[in-house]
Every structure is written in structure tokens, then in C-alpha cells.
Image: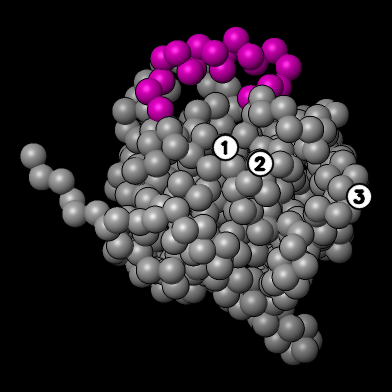
């Protein structure tokens, strides 16, 4: 048995490097609980996220998911739900704890708020059906502070195919993006909203990549080469995304990190939101039957992206409070310093870690902002 040589790392070094980075997590679903009255300020530790734990984990900026479940498509309630989810970020998180969270909409905002010692709060829509096929709603959401949108959730919508139902022959697919879907991408470019390809079908990814004039992100996806599930990205996709300046934000969901977890998870009724009414039994069953992934798995996914696409292509998109199983050693937002230690042990420099944790995301945001200025000036 061979064991890779790992570097000795002191607590002081972990602390120094960790606090020298702006840790930007591009996906957290605590909003699905705050919208139902959960108080993020109470350190209850019954999920993955609360204010105390965010501080303990040294989180500098948090993209809160404005998650719109596919169920809202029926009866056209998607826009209503989107606005309620935006309100929970603005009202139940930022306005309730103004000494701790400040709304950020630009890369400069993140840096300024971080210097002030507060947590930058950002918003990204999860599920392109949120716009109800209207560019006007897309513009309204931008005005309210939304800075990325996943083109789909697990459901194919009227203009983009999802990885979640691409194998379902009962669903009418489009072979990627429709003409309107391409218009959505172009309007996101013009507004300065990041195009997020997490959850989309592979063909949708390739269509979006060829249409987008700005770098794109996968806000919470991992590597298919290490865990072969449709939600993860192939090496070819990762390299192509990186070539256009984009970033893959590694997802901590056990079932996206480890094939063992993914295989066991398939046997359990999927439940995605811990604490959501009526799902507690499923969560318990899931925990009993699914072996968790590990901190080392997360490092392996980051390392794989870095090896094939460079250190500029990797980021963090935990999916905390959006998943039923988190890795041993990275159980919740307070545990991020463990990842810093593991990356240092693996031989990553402080500079590399600063890029992976936030520098790469800031670079994409600035490129997206610059493209929007350019396109708006050209009209
Ligand atoms: Zn998701």
C-alpha cells in the first residue's frame, strides 16, 4: 500500500491561510428553511447553516439559493415563489442581521464587505422556470439583486433541457437550448447575471457555452470522472468551461462525490431538504443506509479539476442545507478550515487556496460585469 506524502501543517498555518482568503460559497439552500420561519441567527446546529457556524467556518461571501421547486410550474406560481425566496434573503437574513450580513451584487461589494468584517450575501436563482418564459421577469430579478441563474433545476423547462429528466421519454425535450433559451443567455450576458450550468443536460451546457459571451459557472457541480452521475461534469465540459474563463464550484453532496454513496443513495427515496416538513423519516433512512463521502473526496474533486483545467477553474459550491448527506470532516459550514488543512497537506499553496476559495469567482464576476458594460454601451 502506498500512502501519498503529505505535508505537516500547523494549526497556525491553517488559520493564517484560511483567514487570508475570501471564502465564497456559491450555493447554500438554508433559504428553503428561512422562508418557513427558520431563524439563521439561532445556533441550533440542526442543519448545516447558521450565523455562528458561518463565522466559525470563515465564510466571507454566501450565495443564497433562490430555489424554485418544479412544483411551482403547475398553475404558474414560479414567479410568486421566486419573489418569496428573494424576500427571505433580503428580509429574514440581511435585514434581520444587518451587523452580520450585507447584500452584495458585485465583486467590489464582496471585497468591501469582507474588509468590514461582515458576510457578503448574494442571491442566485435555482431553476430557469422562475422567469416564466419572460425576459422582463429576468430583468426584474436582476434589479432585485439576483446575480446567477441555473438555466434549469431537475426539470426540463420550456426552453432548456435538464440532466434531471433527460432520460425520461415522457418529457418533451428540445435538444439543449431553444432559440428563446439562447435569448435568455444573451440577456443574462447583457444584464451582468452569471449563466449557471449546474443541473442542465449536457447538450444545454454546450449550447450555453457557445452562445454566452461571458464566462459561466457551475454553481454546485462536481466531476463525472470521479463520480459518474448526470449532475456532474465530464472532463471535456470542465476543460471547455475553463477555456472560456469559467469555474466549477465543487458540490459537497455525498452522492455527487463518491460512487459508493451515489449507489447506496439510489436505493433510498430521494429527499433533498433536511428539516423540510414530513421528510425527516427519509433523512434518517438516508443517513442509515448511505455511507458518507469524505473530506478527502472533496479534495480529490478539486484536485481533478485543477489537474485537467488549471487552478483557475475550481471553486466551492457546497449545497449545504440542500442535501441529505455531507462528507465526514465537512459536515456543515463551520468545518471549512478542515478543507484548508487538507489542501495545504496535499501541497496546495496559500495563493492557490485563495483562488479556489474566492479569487476565481471574483474573476468570473468581474468578467461578467465587464461584458455587461460593454454590451450596454454598444446598444
Ligand atoms: Zn441544486
State the scheme by which the image is colored. Answer: one colour
Disc on res. 332: 1
Query: Which comes before the other along the chain, label 1 or label 3?
Result: 3
Instruction: Choose top left, top right, bottom left or bottom right for residue 284.
Output: top right
Mark 3 lies on a secondary structure that is loop
In the image, the residue with mark 2 has its CB under 8 Å from the nearest atom of ligand 1? no
Q: Residue at x 72, y 70 (%)?
A: 115
Q: Is residue 133 visible?
A: no
Q: Residue furthest left?
A: 1
Mark 2 lies on a secondary structure that is helix
Q: Nearer the viewer, mark 1 or mark 2?
A: 2
Asked if residue 140 lies in the magenta stretch, the reply is no
Q: CA distance from mark 2 to mark 3?
A: 19 Å
Question: 119 or 284: which is nearer to us?
Answer: 119
Instruction: Choose top left, top right, bottom left or bottom right for residue 114.
Output: bottom right
Q: Residue at x 73, y 32 (%)?
A: 43
**Label 2 packing within 10 angstroms: few (<14), some (14-19), many (20+):** many
Question: 96 or 260: which is nearer to us?
Answer: 96
Instruction: Choose top left, top right, bottom left or bottom right for residue 121.
Output: bottom right
Which residue matches tag 2? 53
When the figure is inspected, residue 278 is found, relative to residue 379, above or below; the finding is: above
Q: Is residue 238 visible?
A: yes
Q: Residue at x 35, y 56 (%)?
A: 9
Q: Nearer the viewer, mark 2 or mark 3?
A: 2
Indicate left or right for 37 with 288 as reference: right
Where residue 249 sits: x, y (%)? 50, 55
Amino acid at each position: 500500500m502506498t500512502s501519498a506524502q503529505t505535508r505537516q501543517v500547523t494549526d497556525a498555518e491553517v488559520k493564517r491561510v484560511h483567514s487570508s482568503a475570501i471564502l465564497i460559497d456559491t450555493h447554500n439552500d438554508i433559504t428553503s428553511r428561512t422562508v418557513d420561519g427558520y431563524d439563521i441567527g439561532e445556533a441550533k446546529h440542526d442543519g448545516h447553516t447558521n450565523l455562528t457556524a458561518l463565522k466559525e467556518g470563515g465564510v466571507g461571501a454566501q450565495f443564497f439559493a433562490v430555489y424554485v421547486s418544479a412544483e411551482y410550474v403547475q398553475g404558474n406560481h414560479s414567479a410568486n415563489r421566486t419573489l418569496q425566496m428573494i424576500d427571505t434573503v433580503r428580509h429574514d437574513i440581511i435585514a434581520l442581521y444587518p451587523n452580520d450580513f450585507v447584500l452584495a451584487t458585485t465583486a467590489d461589494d464582496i471585497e468591501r464587505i469582507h474588509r468590514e468584517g461582515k458576510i457578503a450575501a448574494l442571491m442566485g436563482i435555482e431553476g430557469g422556470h422562475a422567469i416564466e418564459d419572460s425576459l422582463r421577469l429576468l430583468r426584474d430579478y436582476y434589479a432585485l439583486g439576483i446575480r446567477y441563474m441555473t438555466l434549469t433545476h431537475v426539470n426540463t423547462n420550456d426552453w432548456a433541457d435538464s440532466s434531471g429528466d433527460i432520460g425520461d421519454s415522457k418529457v418533451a425535450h428540445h435538444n439543449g437550448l431553444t432559440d428563446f433559451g439562447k435569448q435568455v443567455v444573451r440577456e443574462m450576458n447583457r444584464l451582468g447575471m452569471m449563466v449557471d450550468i449546474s443541473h442542465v443536460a449536457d447538450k444545454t451546457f454546450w449550447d450555453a457555452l457557445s452562445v454566452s459571451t461571458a464566462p459561466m459557472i457551475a454553481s454546485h457541480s462536481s466531476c463525472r470522472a470521479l463520480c459518474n452521475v448526470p449532475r456532474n461534469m465530464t472532463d471535456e465540459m470542465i476543460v471547455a468551461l475553463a477555456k472560456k474563463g469559467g469555474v466549477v464550484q465543487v458540490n459537497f453532496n455525498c452522492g455527487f462525490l463518491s460512487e459508493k454513496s451515489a449507489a447506496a443513495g439510489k436505493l433510498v427515496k430521494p429527499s433533498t431538504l433536511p428539516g423540510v416538513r414530513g421528510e425527516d423519516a427519509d433523512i434518517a433512512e438516508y443517513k442509515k443506509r448511505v455511507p458518507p463521502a469524505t473530506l478527502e473526496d472533496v479534495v480529490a474533486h478539486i484536485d481533478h479539476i485543477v489537474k485537467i483545467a488549471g487552478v483557475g477553474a475550481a471553486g466551492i459550491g457546497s449545497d449545504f442545507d440542500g442535501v441529505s448527506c455531507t462528507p465526514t470532516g465537512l459536515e456543515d459550514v463551520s468545518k471549512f478550515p478542515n478543507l484548508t488543512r487538507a489542501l495545504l497537506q496535499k501541497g496546495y499553496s496559500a495563493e492557490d487556496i485563495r483562488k479556489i476559495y474566492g479569487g476565481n469567482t471574483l474573476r468570473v464576476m468581474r468578467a461578467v460585469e465587464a461584458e455587461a458594460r460593454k454590451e450596454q454601451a454598444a446598444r
